[in-house]
Amino acid sequence: GILLNLFKNISLFIIFRKYKKILFSTELLKSSIKKNKIKNCYFNYVLQIFTGFADKHYKKNIDFLIYHRLHNNKNNKIIEYFIRHTLDKNFKIVVVGDPLNWKHIRNMGYVSRNKIKSLLAKTKYTFGSSENLYTLFVLDAISKDVVIFYDKKLKAFNKHIKYHNLRKVDFNN
């Protein structure tokens, strides 16, 4: 908490001293930036990468595609809880990134973004990151018409992308 806040403020100070115009991939830091500096910032740059919605329908034979990273900020507990309680339901669960060593899960490991897009085209459901809804993974999931469960504390980007398959979930309960 305290150290993260300190380093965030130091980083912002250095960035604003060095650059006049700044691109931010999301709005996550917007509330930390002084009002007189905001006019020189462009937020949600990651949305420029969004390729649009799926123009065709795919055969969806993967129930859940999980992007799993072993990192404190990723809130993997909700995903692990979900998997533990669904393994006996015969869902087809595929994991990319750091492996989950449980039976009945197919671990793909680290794969290219194109491979992830290919898997998402065959996927029904996934989880958004608990700290940021604007990830490339989520944007790619939207482009492949995947239902996305996301933490209800996050601000949905429906003002930027009108998407009907976002589902709020309480990641803390």
Image (cartoon, helix red, strand yellow):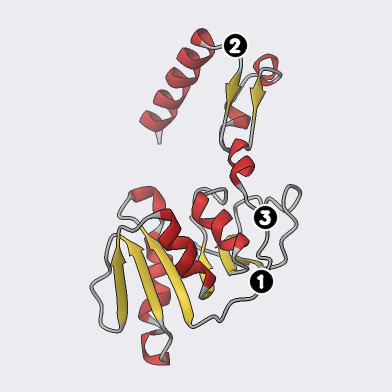
Q: Amino acid at mark 3?
A: Gly
Label 1 vs label 2: CA separation? 42 Å
Figure quadrant of residue 104: bottom left
Q: Earlier in the sequence, mark 1 or mark 2?
A: 2
Q: Residue furthest top?
A: 17
Residue at image coords 31%, 76%: 106
Dot 2 or dot 3, earlier in sequence = 2
Q: Secondary structure at mark 3?
A: loop
Residue 112's spot in the image, x, y percent?
A: 37, 55
* Tag of residue 52: 3
Residue at the disc numbered 2: 20
The answer to which of 115 and 87 lies nearer the viewer is 115
Q: Secondary structure at mark 2?
A: loop
Give the number of the mark in front: 1 or 3.
1
Coordinates of residue 138 in the picture (x, y in percent):
54, 57
Q: Quadrant of the N terminus?
A: top left
Question: Residue 13's x, y, as percent?
Answer: 49, 14
Quickly name the residue at label 1: 56
